[in-house]
């Protein structure tokens, strides 16, 4: 097994993802965590691309980087004195968390190697988007329409929570 | 490997390289000569009052939330648009139902003043 | 392009359209005015109920096999859909006077309730994991918002946040489990997942176990069984009481319906693996739920812990392989839904000027001011205890019989012992209502006509199932058969 360019790109994206994820969890300030998350999302999008999932990668950038992350930053800014909050002092359960995480890692790694993964036909699809479109409009029509209900519910919920108190 | 994405990769590398190069260059060649005026928040302008780290009004959250919902909506529209020709009227109706539901939601949000600033 | 059979989704579509109409009624109602939300909601739910009955009485069975199997209209789905729609009808009736008493009558409230019903209807009919997840999220997101709908109460806000955080957490577990099972089977369809792994010697067995475990954790949060129950007391207590009533009844029915289908069809071949896990969850839920309920001073919290313990009773039957016990679980769910609507509904119907009974003391002397309501409340508590002539007795009898039949006799013994323990805290309410004097006379509102109607229906269901269980048992039997 020799090292290909594709492996190099994978390693680069994996390093970006894991490295920034470490910053997200360990940063002292929430705002640093939020910005580090940008790189985590970016790295994950790169991994999706490497797997040939172009639509997922684009959605990842569009929704997570463009939307969720901005919402997260607003969330920090909406909250009083959250900027400078020293989160580190609150972390007291480092050892149990480390043990659980390490155990989970071992389990997942072992299973990942032992499992014979159900892999589709041995071709990387050139572009997945129109296939996804066909599935949305055919086989997965009901979940697709239900997704619009879900978005609607989220919208109503947000409007209801944000509404001014005196209107209630 | 996906050869079609190689240009994107090259562009990313160029962008990273360019910013690293220019920043490094100014670090190497520039001489820092700080003075109080230079270190103020706006180098030439009104001195700021208080901290910039105020709480933001909740309105930002509402707008952002609606933006995300539209964002997801747009992500759903994209695969539909690609196969629209194959599907014909049926596909149009399917998407129509999808948009109508969300349209109802936005009408509601509009009428109850979620967009009022 | 093959046509999509939408018939199994008709009830859900009707409810969803009603919800949008109610939402727009609110949007176009003038400032400070109320639209006809209640009649519209009731009409929509009744229409959906009718659609369910019509599909059930038509000759075709297992409708919707060519929607790619997203939804199915078999006996199990149709029966539980009817139950959920009944729960929603009663919840709307209860809400109308409660929302007026707490000054929070808004169209969104009904719209969200209806959307939540859409999710529940989907949940009991899914045959495919993506739909399962979307349905679960629709139900949950609507409920998160409903829990926080009382802006004037910090407890309500707290309950929304707690429910949301734990709910989102559990959804992540569920999704992870689904991904594991997809990795093995290459499909999200329950049938194909079931046929992908059958023997323990399969090299993929480990991954399947992980997937099943994660699914169980995800469902565990939704049905509030120990150790995934921590949110339940705070959420049940803080949420507006009619929302609690709807949640305690509807979510249990929908989540157990989905649990029956997922573990009864998709994962039935792995029963030997997950049965011990379910048994452990059942024991912990029964024991800890009942013991914690003993120590509560708030009636709502007591009922929340009691709901944890009842999740345990239901799980105890589930170990008997869903195909055997489905009948018992389904029957129990009907009576239990009515009881939950009744207990929380009784509390909510007393609300006046934004206040409502919370502690045991608040219920003191209730039998004098509200003799009928106190009697109804007693009926519900008797059913929760599992005393004969109530739905709870027949239900528990079948649950524990199923557990014994599967060779899990200790589970049944724990269940019976814990039911005896539970009598203490249920009877405490009765003692307060009948044998203590009210500290303040006339503190609570007279029960409105709509609430009285809803409570009367609940009492009838509870007593009817206790005295004449055969009819519903036959339906439950047919529903269980459709799992085969």
Image (spheres, rainbow, N blue to C red):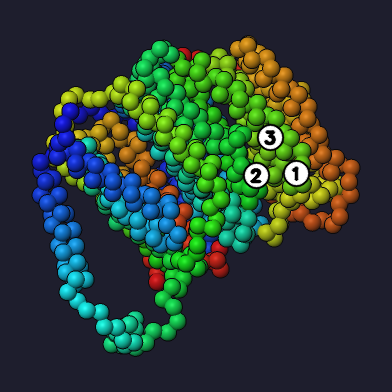
Q: Chain of mark 1?
A: C
Badge 3 marks a residue whose secondary structure is helix
Badge 2 marks a residue whose secondary structure is helix
Residue marked by disc 1? C296
Q: Which label is found at residue C289?
A: 3
First reached walking from the N terminus: tag 2 or tag 3: 2
Dot 1 and dot 2 residues touching (CB under 8 Å) = yes
Same subunit, labels 3 and 1: the answer reads yes
Q: Is residue C483 visible?
A: no
Left or right, A16 with respect to A122, comes to right
Question: Of A9 and B81, which appears nearest the observer?
Answer: A9
Mark 2 crowdedness (10 Å alpha carbons): few <14, some 14-19, many ≥20: many
Return the x and y of residue A24 as percentages of the image width and height: 39, 53
Mark 3 crowdedness (10 Å alpha carbons): few <14, some 14-19, many ≥20: many
Q: Is residue C256 visible?
A: yes
Q: CA distance from mark 1 to mark 2?
A: 10 Å
Residue at screen point 35% across, 56% down: A36
């Amino acid at each position: 097994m020799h090292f290909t360019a594709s492996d190099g790109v994978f390693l680069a994206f994996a390093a970006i993802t894991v490295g920034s994820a470490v910053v997200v969890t360990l940063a002292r300030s929430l705002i640093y965590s939020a910005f580090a998350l940008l790189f985590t999302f970016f790295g994950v999008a790169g991994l999706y691309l490497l797997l040939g999932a172009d639509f997922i990668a684009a959605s990842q950038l569009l929704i997570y980087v463009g939307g969720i992350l901005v919402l997260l930053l607003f969330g920090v800014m909406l909250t009083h004195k959250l900027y400078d909050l020293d989160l580190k002092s609150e972390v007291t359960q480092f050892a149990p968390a480390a043990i659980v995480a390490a155990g989970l890692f071992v389990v997942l790694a072992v299973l990942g190697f032992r499992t014979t993964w159900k892999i589709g036909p041995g071709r990387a699809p050139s572009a997945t988007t129109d296939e996804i479109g066909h599935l949305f409009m055919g086989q997965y029509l009901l979940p697709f329409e239900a997704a619009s209900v879900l978005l609607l519910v989220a919208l109503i919920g947000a409007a209801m929570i944000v509404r001014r108190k005196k209107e209630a | 490997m996906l050869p079609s994405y190689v240009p994107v990769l090259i562009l990313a590398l160029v962008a990273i390289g360019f910013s690293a190069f220019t920043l490094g260059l100014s670090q190497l060649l520039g001489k820092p000569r700080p003075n109080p005026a230079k270190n103020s928040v706006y180098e030439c302008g009104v001195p700021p009052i208080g901290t910039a780290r105020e709480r933001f009004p909740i309105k930002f959250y509402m707008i952002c939330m609606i933006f995300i919902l539209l964002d997801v909506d747009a992500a759903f529209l994209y695969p539909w648009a690609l196969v629209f020709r194959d599907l014909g009227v049926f596909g149009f109706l399917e998407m129509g139902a999808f948009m109508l539901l969300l349209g109802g939601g936005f009408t509601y949000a509009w009428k109850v003043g979620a967009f009022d600033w | 392009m093959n046509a999509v059979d939408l018939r199994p989704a008709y009830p859900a579509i009707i409810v969803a359209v009603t919800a949008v109409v109610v939402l727009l009624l609110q949007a176009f109602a003038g400032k400070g005015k109320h639209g006809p939300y209640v009649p519209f909601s009731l009409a929509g739910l009744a229409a959906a109920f009718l659609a369910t009955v019509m599909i059930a009485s038509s000759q075709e069975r297992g409708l919707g096999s060519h929607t790619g199997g997203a939804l199915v209209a078999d006996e199990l789905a149709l029966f539980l859909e009817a139950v959920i729609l009944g729960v929603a009808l009663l919840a709307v009736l209860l809400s109308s006077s409660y929302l007026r008493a707490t000054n929070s009558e808004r169209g969104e409230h009904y719209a969200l309730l209806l959307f939540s019903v859409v999710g529940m209807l989907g949940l009991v009919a899914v045959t495919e994991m993506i739909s399962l997840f979307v349905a679960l999220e629709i139900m949950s997101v609507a409920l998160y918002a409903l829990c926080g709908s009382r802006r004037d109460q910090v407890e309500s806000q707290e309950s929304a946040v707690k429910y949301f955080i734990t709910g989102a957490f559990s959804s992540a577990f569920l999704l992870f489990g689904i991904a594991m099972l997809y990795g093995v089977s290459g499909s999200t369809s329950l049938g194909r997942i079931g046929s992908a792994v059958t023997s323990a010697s399969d090299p993929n067995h480990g991954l399947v176990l992980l997937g099943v475990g994660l699914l169980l954790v995800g469902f565990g949060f939704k049905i509030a069984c120990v150790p995934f129950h921590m949110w339940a007391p705070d959420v049940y207590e803080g949420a507006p009481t009619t929302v609690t009533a709807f949640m305690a009844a509807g979510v249990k029915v929908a989540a157990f319906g989905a649990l029956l289908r997922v573990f009864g069809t998709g994962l039935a071949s792995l029963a030997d693996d997950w049965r011990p896990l379910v048994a452990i969850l059942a024991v912990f839920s029964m024991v800890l739920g009942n013991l914690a309920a003993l120590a509560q001073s708030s009636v709502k919290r007591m009922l929340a812990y009691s709901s944890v313990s009842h999740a345990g009773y239901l799980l105890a039957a589930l170990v008997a392989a869903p195909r055997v016990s489905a009948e018992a679980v389904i029957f129990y769910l009907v009576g239990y839904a009515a009881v939950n609507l009744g207990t929380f509904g009784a509390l909510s119907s007393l609300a006046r000027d934004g206040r409502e009974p919370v502690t045991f003391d608040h219920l003191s002397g209730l039998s004098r001011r509200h003799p009928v309501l106190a009697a109804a409340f007693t009926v519900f508590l008797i059913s929760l205890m599992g005393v004969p002539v109530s739905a709870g007795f027949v239900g528990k009898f079948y649950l524990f019989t199923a557990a014994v039949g599967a060779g899990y006799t200790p589970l049944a013994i724990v269940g019976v012992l814990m039911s005896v323990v539970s009598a203490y805290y249920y009877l405490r309410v009765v003692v307060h209502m009948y044998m203590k004097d009210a500290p303040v006379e006339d503190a609570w509102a007279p029960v409105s006509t709509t609430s009285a109607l809803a409570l009367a229906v609940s009492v009838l269901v509870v007593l009817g199932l206790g005295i004449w269980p055969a009819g519903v048992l036959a339906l439950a039997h047919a529903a269980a058969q459709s799992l085969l």
